Amino acid sequence: MGIGNRLRKDDGIGPFIIEKLRKKIKEKILIDAGETPENYLEFIISKNPEELIIIDAADFGEIPGKWRVFTEEDIRREKIRSFSTHSIPLSLWIELLKRELPNLKVKLIGIQPQETDFGEGISDILKKKVEEVIKYIQKY
C-alpha cells in the first residue's frame, strides 16, 4: 500500500512506487491509498492478508533517497515522522487494523524525502531508489 500526496512532491513516493509495481506484479493486491489510508481499512480487513507493506515518505534523519524498513514497534514508538497528510497518525491506523487482524504483520518502507513542498513530481534522487525498493518488495 502506497501512502502520500502526489501534489506535495516527494510525499507522493508511495503512490508513485505502487504505480510502477502494477506493471511488474499481478498476483498481489496493490493499493494506492493516497492521503487517506483510513478509507482502505475495511477493504484490507476483508482480504485478511498475512502481511501488509506500507510505502511512504518518512523523516528519519537520513539523506534524501535513503530508505529503511520499519517494524510495527518502530512506528508505534514514532521513531519516524510521516510527511503524508494523513487524517490520523499511521500508528493509530495500524492499531485499528490490528484489532480486526491481530496476526497481521505490518512493515513500513520509509523513504527520506528531499522536498515535500507543494508541486508535482518526485525528485531525481528518490526516483533513483525506486528500483531498489521494488526489488525488496518483489521478494514477498
Image (spheres, rainbow, N blue to C red):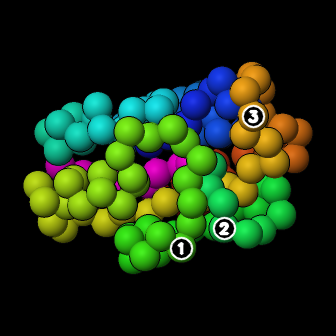
Residues at circles 2 and 1 in contact by the CB criterion of under 8 Å? yes
For marks 3 and 2, the one nearer the N-term is 2
Q: Is residue 75 found left or right of 138 in the rendered image?
A: left
- In percent of width and height, residue 8 lies at 68, 31
Q: Residues within 10 Å of mark 2 (few under 14, many from 20)?
A: some
Based on the picture, tell me whether residue 50 belongs to the magenta stretch: yes
Q: Earlier in the sequence, mark 1 or mark 3?
A: 1
Which residue shows up at 31% across the image and 66% down it? 105
Left or right: where does residue 56 sit relative to residue 87?
right
Q: Which residue is mark 2?
A: 60
> In this picture, is 48 found above or below 27?
below
- Say whether disc 2 or disc 1 marks the residue closer to the N-terminus: 2
Quadrant location of residue 80? bottom right
Q: Which residue is mark 3?
A: 117
> What are the residue bounds of the magenta stretch?
47-56
Q: For label 3, count other residues whose C-alpha is less than 10 Å away and answer few (under 14), some (14-19) or many (20+).
A: few
Alpha carbon distance from label 2 to label 1? 7 Å
**Residue 17, numbered circle:** none
Q: Is residue 53 above or below residue 14?
A: below
Q: Is residue 136 above or below residue 26?
A: below
User: CA gap, disc 1 to disc 3?
Assistant: 22 Å
Q: Is residue 82 magenta?
A: no
Q: Quadrant of the N terminus?
A: top left
Q: Quadrant of residue 43?
A: top left
SS at circle 3: loop
Q: Position of residue 89 (x, y in %)?
A: 39, 52
Amino acid carrying label 1: it is Lys
Helix, strand or loop for the magenta stretch, by majority: strand
Would you name the residue on which mark 1 appears? 79
Cα–Cα span, label 3 and label 2: 18 Å
| 88 or 128, nearer to the observer | 88
Marks 2 and 3: in contact by CB < 8 Å? no
